[in-house]
Amino acid sequence: MKVTKDGLAVFFLGGMHLKCVWVVPKGQSERIVLPYEYIQEDDDVQSDPAVISHLKPSPQRPTLQGKSLLIRELPEQWVLTRHQFTSGAVQLSMGISLKRSAPTCNRCGNYDKEQFATFDCYWCGRNQCLYCRSCIMMGKVTTCTPLVHVPVAEPFPGKRLKWNGVLTKEQQSASLQMIDLLHHTTDNELLIWAVCGAGKTEMLFPLIIEAIDQQKTLLIATPRTDVVLELFPRIRQAFPQLHSIALYGGSEERFQSAPLVISTTHQTRRFFQYFDVVIIDEIDAFPYHFDDSLRFAVNKAAKPSAKFYYLSATPPQPLIRKLQSNNQIAMINRRYHGYPLPVPVIKWIGDWRSYVERKKLPPKLTSWMKRQQQESGRQLLIFVPSIKVAEQVEAIIARKDVICVHSQHSDRKEIVEAFRHKQYYCLITTTILERGVTFPSVDVVVLGAENDVFTIAALVQIAGRAGRSKEDPKGDVLFLHDGTTIAMKQAVKQIKRMNDK
Amino acid sequence: MNKCLYCQRVIEEQVSWSTLFQREHRQFCHACWQQIKWINDLRCSRCYRPQSSQSVCLDCVRWDKSNHWSNKLTRNVSLLSYNEWAQDFVARFKFRGDVVLVKAFEHELKRLYSRQFHHHLIVPIPLSEKRMVERGFNQSEALARCMATSINDVLTRVIHEEKTSKKLRWQRMAGRSRPFEVSEAGCLKSRDVVLVDDIYTTGATVRKAATVLLEAGATSVSSITLFRS
């Protein structure tokens, strides 16, 4: 047994699933949950040893702010001492709690019975040990797995941060509204409804400066890894003196923490009541919009007193209704360069699927592409409804400077980067690139715009890819369809309305 | 509504006569099921290596040439080819510990055992203590439990080795180490044994296990693995 003088090393603790007991340590009045191995002779032991989910009475909600991790996620060389437990510097809580035998995973919030399974567990020796399947890719949580709550203290920069950029009038007023919320006593939510290309990231900078000045921790959460990868370098560049980290599946900094964390919503699950300011980018984007457990993750990572900022170009109706009455919406109708949004053109092209099946492009698309390439000089972004169609269209065009990208593509990051550097003329994509990514000068085509995947929000976002830069604020947006949908009409209407305001 | 055990999407059942009379419910959705590559008749007759003919493969010939290793393993039978999807599956099943995934192949494993290895003693390949502590379960045992209710844990793994998946082929073949020991020899006397493991790559692991089983009195040793790479 690798027991040091003070406690047990993490690499040893991680190997066993701890039996726990309720104990009133000698000289203290309150009882705590202590791993069985840490009991001393003069402790007042108040319960039978049991795996944490079966401990009676159940452990209470933890109170420690910081991170909640599995033991094997802690640095291996750490030693957990008895003193840390008895002084409350480290707390244990249930990985899975069982209420009348209905399980809830306390890491990811999953309570769907189908998302749990049992197995022959070597750790606790029971053959009906329950584990959560929903977050298993982040490490297995079982009924015998405790979550270890450890505090995280991060040094803040001593000086007030500086940023030398300039905001437009619209951006300025929105960012003032954001800072106001920071000081507000009752409200704790604000929706920032900004058109695509309004310069949302820059608008956040004054808020970041103010929050860091007040020693507040910030989380910028976004549903997509692509957005994290795009946002992170921009923020690091703006504030090189601030310690910021990017967390996404597979990132190396996964277990670190910093005053400013940019993270996918999944990765926020490892925090517990840590952030004072939570900024959620693309609030309407899949999968955040749908997935309860991701909402759980963000709420878990935030302190009870945290301020929430929701960013979106196409906010969901319920959120608008909720915040409208209280004036908790900041609107930005202008792009940062002041030009209006490109208005999409809706065009019927007939049964495009049968063309694609016959390995041809619809003639209207072919002729338009020919003209586009000669006249506009922009790159071309083609959105299609599915991965299959993306690959088919790529095969039909069959040119070296035309490539397709989708969620299953292993070089997705590299391809998007290469397109941004103009190594390709045309990129065919599924809806994965509908938001968050910026290309300076593109024309946009949606092939098969009648498909269900192209919702109002998706179409508005897609149209928002065009005309992003000051140098080329215009761009063509084309919805090619085989039957107009309400979504297409509504999207155009919404864009026009934004332009008129 | 049934959900796919693998991707969690709702399985859209297309009702036909065959689905109506199916006894077992399909655990995977169509898209996931299609990614699975079953090993058909075009494979080595000794070790189920997928190839273009049914002859004995070069792998097996090489094993037989070695004095030390010949005649250890009677044959190996595998269900699936170790393709890209399988790597994903193994990562989730074995390394992440999503044990319930074996259910998808329960039916096929059971059938394979009862048709080809009836009355054989089922012995799962054990894990070392250290690996067991790390994973919390033994993947081979989980597979073996699909085949029959009674399995025989007669082996122990006494030497903790580097993961074989990190070794090269010649390193695996040259290894003369004896990682396994028989803990209960009593039930092995003049019995046919079938070993169960998750992947057969070069066959070094099952041969090492076979060696000690034969020494302890087993008549023959074969193996069943879920994947054959």
Image: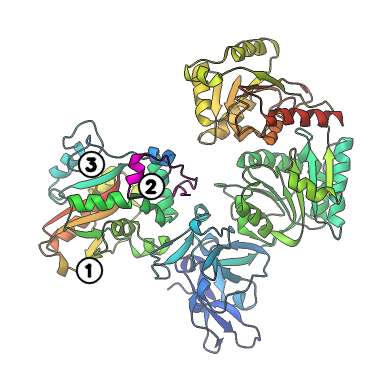
Q: Which mark is residue B183?
A: 1
Report how far apart the C-alphas of labels 2 and 1 lie in the structure.
38 Å
Q: Main secondary structure of the magenta part?
A: loop
Structure colour scheme? rainbow
> Of callouts 2 and 3, which one flags the residue occurring earlier in the amino acid sequence?
2
Which residue is disc 3 drawn over?
Answer: B48
Please give the chain letter of the residue carrying mark 1.
B
> Of callouts 2 and 1, which one flags the residue occurring earlier in the amino acid sequence?
2
Report how far apart the C-alphas of labels 2 and 3 lie in the structure.
25 Å
Measured as percent of width and height from the top left, residue B16 is found at 37, 39
* Amino acid, disc 2: Arg
Residue A27 in the figure: left or right of residue A1: right
**Residues marked 2 and 3 touching at CB (< 8 Å):** no
> How crowded is the residue under tag 2: few (<14 C-alpha within 10 Å), some, or many (20+)?
many
Q: Which mark is residue A393?
A: none
Measured as percent of width and height from the top left, residue A85 is found at 60, 75
- Please state the extent of the stretch shown in magenta in the rendering: B1-26
* Amino acid, disc 1: Ser
Magenta-drawn stretch contains B2: yes
Magenta-drawn stretch contains A440: no
